[in-house]
Amino acid sequence: MSSKGHKVEEPWQGFHGPNLGVAIELYEEYSKNPEAVEEDLRELFEVWGPPPSESQSQNQPDSGVSATSPDMVRMFVNAVKLADMIRRKGHLVSDTNPIFKSGNNSQLLELSQYDLTEEFLKQVPVDMICPYAPAHVKNGLDAINHLKNVYTKTITFEFNHVHDLEEREWLMKMVESGMYLPNLTKQQQLNLLKRLTQVEGFEKFIHRTFVGQKRFSIEGLDMLVPMLDEAVREVVHEGTQKVLIGMAHRGRLNVLAHTLNKPYKMIFSEFLHAPSKDLDPSEGSGINGWTGDVKYHLGADRQIKEENTAEATVSLANNPSHLEFVSPIVEGYARAAQEVRTSKGFPEQIVSKAYSVLIHGDAAFPGQGIVTETLNLSRLKGYQTGGSLHIIANNNIGFTTETYDSRSTTYASDPAKGFEIPILHVNADDPEACLAAIHIAVQYRKRFKKDFLIDLIGYRRFGHNEMDEPAVTQPSTYNLIRKHPTVRAIYANKLAKASVIEQTYGEELDQDTQDNLQVQYDDVIANKSNHSKEMSAPDYVVNGLPKVKTSVPFDTLKEINEELLTWPDSFSANTKLEKILKRRLQSFDEDGKIDWALAETLAFAAILHDGTPIRLTGQDSERGTFAHRHLVLHDRDTNEIHTPLQTFEKANASFAVYNSPLSEQAVVGFEYGYNVQAPETLVLWEAQFGDFANGAQVIFDQWVSAGRAKWGQKSGLVVLLPHGYEGQGPEHSSGRVERFLVLAAENNWTIANCTSAAQYFHILRRQAKILEKDSVRPLIIMTPKSLLRNQVVASTHAEFTEGEFKPVFEQEGLGNKADKVERIVLCSGKLSIDLADRVSKKADQDWDWLHIARVEELYPFPKKPIREMFSRFSNLKEITWVQEEPKNMGAWPYIESRIREITPKGTTLSYIGRTHRSSPAEGDPIAHKKEQERIVTESLTPKQ
């Protein structure tokens, strides 16, 4: 325990003289026989051990209190226990709920429960009860009353679950000394009232003007906007350059209007579904997508340029109705904004550069697992952002569901306790307490670089949306809410009573706000445009990817390879692994070939040499799930690590690789957010097995696939999904390519299934080259498992030094006699190698009737090269699509119509593969082998 200052956790601090002597005697009795002392004393000794000796406490001042009996000692102990109970349980009797007043647990803090009297407490030293008490606290009774005032009013705290003693001491000092409380000037109070008037007035105007239209009102939690104002002001004043906010739709329009300064006119025109002629469509919103989204899903950016303040950007992330799923995305934004990636090695992280604020719903915070996944990222080296501010916008209801039906915890905030995040509960009807909450949160993050949570407790003035009637499901609650004054009215009345404003000023301010909003609305009506928004993708998306050079000279690749395999003299790799990796030197011999793992490493190295940073994460990405990658080496004696891609001389940008936590949803969201914020960086996420991407389906559906069309949000994220049927059962076979293909449209991403090391090399290089171009798009790759070490997929030097990625890859040795080819087999992925292997083993057979082509780029469908290939074969009778996945999965449901469209007249199109199945693969390896054999044999047998 730290020696700095007194700790309330150390009750012996208040014992000296006769009191201490009695305590020592009682401890000696306890040491001989614990049952010899009463239960309260046993608990004290068990927790705190023996009291200090007389010599240890001789320098302590005499309190003037005499205690010579066990009963007196017990009363001192009880005073300490009461103080501790106030700290730990005060929130249970606090005044933090503006609608429902708490009183059920008031007996917890009654003096009689602890055999204490006011007269006795007056004799207890202040330091024994509250070492950080302000000067007006003169004795133990004052101290107890002070603690009750601190912990049971409109703001209260939970930090007993924070195990770090330095943090707990700091929190206790801030809270009990009152250092965190704002000392607002009259002007600041007036400004706060004006802001609350704007917040409420905006909602009232929309409610009256656009009757029945959804807006997901902030009313009941109006203080959220001034709290965001304060958080932004404080962190920007400290030098933060980016404040990144994520929130669901409740209160979003108000945050857009006031925190992000989105013009009222823009919002009104969105309600009217008619753009205003004098407003740029993207002004105040940053939205450039062609299909668009509803107004309460949109994000925005705001530039801050004020005197005595560094330039900064405040951003609200786009977010659909999936509530909390934006959280890891915003954390990814923040991490990317904090890192400098222009030099080799790990990126340099400066956490003060960016601050993330996540606004949660009270039903969603404990209800959606993505929250816990995101909280788990907060202290991991690959994902931490130096502390985020979490605010639960707590209106004590989820749509129509009561809290007792939506969570098993006392508070919505309770899941944060498992991550030792300090929690503060505050009444949303006390504006100055709400600002105090922000101040302590910002200071805690500045000091400890960790997350902080504010539970902003209010209510929801109307239904879930403005078409709902809440009294149908919560009649008694809404009877109270309808009678409850707004926070603006409450605060105006408070200021009037304190003579800060005139009694009528609040209403005058409210009327001025309504008048201003009416003027803005009238201007929109007068300037309505009949122009309808263009719903087509722009040309730079439609036209596809530009031509880029991805080949690398032989000497450059050879030199890179040699340097990556030259390790420090002091480093001793695993003996077996060293032999395996050193064999890569032979890959550049005259007849050498480059396998999949080496091709990937060389691609990464060449990309870094070009000055493009790389970030790779996944559950086992450092080594690789299939023990093929080994980007991070461990010293066999010291466990020190060496990452060659971070140290090689030719690197001109940072390289980061992390083993991720056992999460897909949060990690994919984080990597997507990182890539959006750092568009110059090649960001890759790798699934342990391809089908594990199922766990991130919301991120793929709502952001990765559709973010550009909805919001104009560009991404070049790379997703690596190990895929291939090898008898490992239904959960480790399919990367579920069909799910990505069904979402494919408008050139929204590239979906590939590569079957050679060179193809993989070139597609990665191509992706890196297009990152900052308008045509950039995500890349989904079905990667191999067993093929990783198969020399059939290894490539010659020439394929790296002269080649490029080929959307269609024709098998060598077949199709040479064009007039004899009757069947073309189109296939993709591992099955292509199975077919090639069978053909090569039966090279003495007549294969003139057959040609095989691998469709390496499934989307966008390579229509032109496939049609040109078909045209070369004048006697073609049959085109067959062959796949290993069931007929209702894999590429067939997507690709059938596309092939049929270009099938030559008189040629049939057929399917060979597994039949329709509900499960993606057989569970029995023998059944798998038999079915795989049937597919290969049927594909390579001419029709009779």
Image: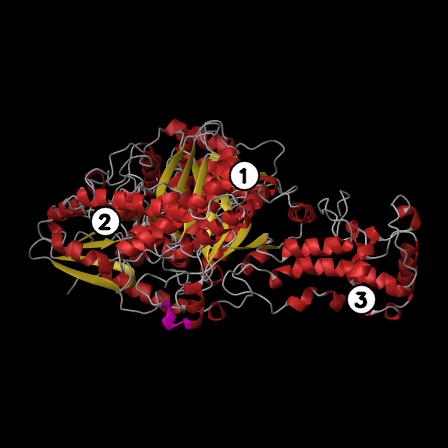
Residue at the image position 73 percent from the left and 44 percent from the top: 135
Left or right position of 597 against 350: left
Res. 40 mark: 3
Q: Residue 42 at what x, y percent from top left? A: 82, 65
Circle 1 residues within 10 Å: few <14, some 14–19, many ≥20: few
Q: Which residues are magenta?
A: 470-475
Q: Is residue 465 left or right of residue 153?
A: left
Q: Amino acid at mark 1?
A: Thr
SS under mark 2: loop
Q: Amino acid at mark 3?
A: Asp
Q: Which residue is mark 2?
A: 291
Where is 369 relative to 273, above or below?
Answer: below
Q: Splitting the image into 4 quarters, where does residue 48 fall?
A: bottom right
Label 2 crowd bin: few (<14), some (14–19), many (20+), radius 10 Å: some
Residue beneath label 1, please?
Answer: 185
Question: Tag 2 or tag 3, which sits nearer the N-term?
Answer: 3
Q: CA distance from mark 3 to mark 1?
A: 48 Å
